[in-house]
Amino acid sequence: MNEPKLRELLCEVPVPGAEEAERRGLAVVAAAFAERQAAGIDGAGGRRRAARARTSPRRLALALALAALAAALILSPAGASVRHWVGDVFSENVPKARPGLGRTPGGGRLLVTSAAGPWVVQPDGSRRLLGDYEEATWSPRGLFVAAVSGRTLSAVEPDGTPHWSLTAPGRVSDPRWSPSRFRIAYRAGSQLRVAFADGSSDRAIAAGAAAVAPAWMPLGVAELAYVDRQGRLRIAESETGRGLASAAALPGIDEIEWGGRGEVLLESSPAAVRVRRLQTAKLALEVGVEPGRRLPLPAGAAVRDAALSPDGRTVAVLVSIPLASIAGGPGTRSTVLLFGPDGPSRRLLTVPGNLSELAFSPDGARLLVAWPEADEWLFLPLGRSKGEAVGNVARAFAPGERAAEFPRVEGWCCRAR
Amino acid sequence: MGAESGAIERVEWNGPIPARRERQLIREAQRGSEQALADLYSAHWRRAHRAAYLIVHDAAAAEDVAQDAFLAAIGALDRFDRRRPFGPWLHRIVANRAIDWARREALRRRVDATEESEARPPEGIGEDLMEALAELPADQRAAVVLRYLLEYSPGEIAEMLELPRGTVNSRLRRALDRLGELLEAER
């Protein structure tokens, strides 16, 4: 190949999504530039005195997170124009928060754990503390909650009425109710155990389970995926513990989800997210585990959370990227990426600061994104329509307390069946 | 913040930005002018993004590499010597980050060789070239992109990649030979 031809081709090769990338890049760069200004670095390189008086800790977090937007809108004489291009990242995608927890956007009930214990949040925003439990999970139709306290696993109604409890041989964690409604899997110490949903027939089905919550086969078949301490992903028949398949799990794996009609299994670790295809059949004696596809993530990104949509067709991944390594300054930016079955990723949201977790709505049309620094939950439609946000989340689950920890979302219930 | 007035507009540059104008924009950006930053961005983004894409062969990664290069540039804006051109400074960051990314990706694929490949050659213009480039090691791809897309001399490339000039020349030679073989074989 001659050199002029090579030059010509290098200039002509189409770059996929170039225009959108340019627009997004401008928004991110503009935001970082505005953040630099807001941080007080003046034109001569010196530090100028902070312009604002002290704010409350809660608002300070939000103010830092939105420093770029604030600088663009308040400090710049050309703010209106800046808002237009900064807005691609911040103002369009981050809805203004309602001041308190009211109607849940998209409906459904939330199960939320705060320092006080698990709470059920009704669609109208009213909420009830279930009791002194450490974690909890919904039953498939939301008629019960499996709740954990020390070595005790309990089933309680959403109004807090306890039904039964069992005592396990070790500290209980990661309960998961089977889609069939008839079993509950959980970890007790290093054992993986399964009990009937009335609390009877509790038994170990595997020893040496890693600290990863098990995942049930979504079609109601009594098959369970878990990770062992040797770092292998295993699929077992839950009645007997008989192994059906195994494969090397993602290194450092901390979460698995089994979704769709049983054909998709999501693995995530702090460094990567992988989607595997499974070959399953009700009458088959074994499960086929395909190698999987590792999702392409931004350079330097740390995975904070990943979630599989209820139909198993969309994977949402929350990543954070420290700006110290790329922009020489403090702070982090967080991005929620959506991956379809085969296509490239789409950015749903990018904000400065840290987002902490994701949860799909029961119909898969929305994502709940937790933003502890802003004390908000964001309810973002996967389509192009505008999202909603709820503020003062921590205080909603710590009534009467001065200090409140941001709660953890355990689940969003329930999908119509 | 600089005393800007009026609406900010994005300026489309068809060719290299004049050196004097670029120095002026950098000075204004250092003083806080968002308009100057937007003009610098418009002048340099497309080539930086294209260069990253041609090295990493992954659209999402290329976007991140280019974004990160600009963010790094903003982070170091106050330390930037205005007498030097902005482009080579930016392209140096792009090239090195893209090489790092491509090497990590290649290593990851070797470690986890059972995974399906996510790389999909683009269809249409330049498809053969992209497939041929993908066969080259990342450092050779970077040398080709810096030489034939961004038009740097081997001496300049050596400085950007912190390599001996002879190494750059040999990488370019090997890359061109290999590209020639691959593209010839596909005819």
Image (cartoon, rainbow, N blue to C red):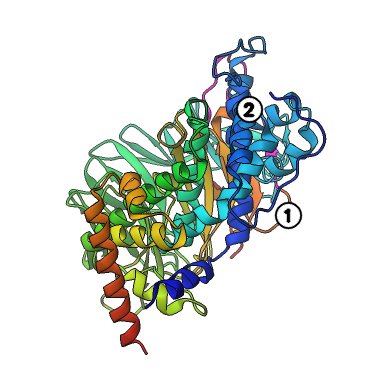
List the residue tagged with mark 2: A67
- Please identify the quarter of the rendering in which residue A275 is found: bottom left
Residue interval drawn in magenta:
A387-409
Q: What's the residue type where badge 2 is placed?
A: Ala
Residue A120 visible in the displayed image: yes
Quadrant in the picture for the N terminus of chain B: top right
Please tell me whether residue B97 belongs to the stretch shown in magenta. Answer: no
Quadrant in the picture for the C terminus of chain B: bottom left
- Please identify the quarter of the rendering in which residue B57 is found: bottom left
Q: Gap in Å between the C-alphas at discs 1 and 2?
A: 25 Å
Residue A410 visible in the displayed image: no
Q: Dot 2: within a 10 Å radius of its alpha carbon, few (fewer than 14), some, or many (20 or more) residues? A: many
Which chain is mark 2 on? Answer: A
Q: What's the residue type where badge 1 is placed?
A: Ser
Q: Position of residue A174 (x, y in %)?
A: 36, 44
Residue at image position (65%, 49%) is: A380
Secondary structure under badge 2?
Answer: helix
Residue at image position (31%, 87%) is: B185
Mark nearer the N terminus (1 vs 2): 2
Secondary structure under badge 1?
Answer: loop
Residue A39 vertical placement versus A207 (above, below): above
List the residue tagged with mark 1: A385
Q: Position of residue A256 (x, y in %)?
A: 37, 54
Residue A278 vertical placement versus A384 (above, below): below
